[in-house]
Amino acid sequence: MLKYLLLVGGFFLLIKGADLFVDGSSAAAKMLKVSPLVIGMTIVAMGTSLPETSVSVSAAIAGKNELAISNVVGSNIFNLMVVCGMCALLCPLKIDGLSLKRDFPFSIGIAGLLMLLGRPDKTVGHIDGVILLVVFIGFLVIMIGTARKQDASADDEFKTMPVWKLVLFIIIGMAAIAAGGKMVVSGASDIARRFGMSDNLIGMTVVALGTSLPELVTSMVAAKKNEVDMALGNVIGSNIFNILFVLGVAAAIHPVEFTMLNFIDTAVLILMSGLVLLLCFRSKKLVRWQGAVMLVLYAGYTAYIINRG
């Protein structure tokens, strides 16, 4: 029972910690007169991916290598198929042209890069982690450059707050995320062993769902308000961040094993990404029936990974 409480408590700390970090960082960025679009593409994206960062880095340090990779790949598949699929069910999901032509193909390409780095020696090592981080920095520079060329008009998008409060939010948020990550890794690993489940299965299901909750909740709220023009772009950006930054940091700190199951799951991520790209390429949107297809495909793949153990 204690392990279940540890897992739930860890997820709570991850989500609330990311919430506080994003609010505090966004307020700080506004105070420094940084464009809200730049904030959304950098600081907020970093905040919503902090749960994955915390879990994967904690797993790598603890030697739970399968959990480190499967958490990121599982979260990316969940973000793409479930978050976007649920949003498309609520209302047509419009897709930004730049995301469709640049970011989406890039997200597929870096998943291929991960497979390339991991397969020769079945390990994503220190040098591989540095390579991922260098690519991330390059992409980040391009995103910021693009954002600065666009009109920053949403000055009231983020709340203002006193300096002491935003600093407190950032510190508490980071502490909660770090603690939550360790709790999730510990709880999930113990539960997996108790039921004879592999770390890969736990990472691809329970942990992936838990660390993707911030993206899911945010996107669902946006869909209900019919403010989903950038929803798919945000998911793609988060997926790019997860592979390049999260795994880059984890591997740079401690080599991460890349198993055959990781290889298969990453290949599935590439195939699903390609399918979604084909579904929305002409119309530049995802409609309800397409969202339903994505959810069914995700359910089928979840059944497969549960069956394989």
Image (spheres, rainbow, N blue to C red):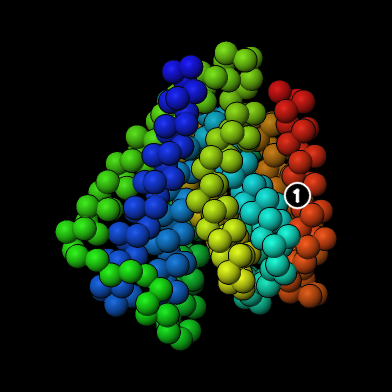
In the figure, 215 relative to 260: above or below? below
> Which residue is pictured at 39% across the width and 39% down the height?
13
In the figure, 297 relative to 162: above or below? above
List the single residue furthest toward the left: 164
Write down the quadrant of residue 98 in the picture: bottom right
Residue 79 coordinates in the image, percent (x, y): 62, 51
List the single residue furthest toward the front: 224
Residue 268 coordinates in the image, percent (x, y): 74, 44
> Which residue is pictured at 58% across the width and 25% down the height?
199
Q: Exactly how many numbered labels are in the figure?
A: 1
> Which residue is pictured at 39% across the width and 46% down the height?
16
> Which residue is pictured at 73% across the width and 36% down the height?
302
Residue 148 coordinates in the image, percent (x, y): 43, 81
Of residue 270 and residue 172, the one placed in the foreground of this image is: 172
Answer with left or right where residue 282 lies relative to residue 236: right
Q: Which corner quadrant holds the C terminus?
A: top right
What's the amino acid at mark 1? Leu
Packing grade of label 1 (10 A; few <14, some 14-19, many >=20) is: many
Answer with left or right where residue 92 lies relative to residue 139: right
- The residue to which callout 1 is attached is 295
Q: Under tag 1, what secondary structure?
A: helix
Residue 92 coordinates in the image, percent (x, y): 72, 69
Of residue 68 and residue 117, the one placed in the foreground of this image is: 68
Of residue 111 and residue 288, the one placed in the foreground of this image is: 288
Write down the quadrant of residue 115 in the picture: top right
Residue 240 visible? The answer is: no
Residue 10 visible? The answer is: yes
In the figure, 143 relative to 71: above or below? below
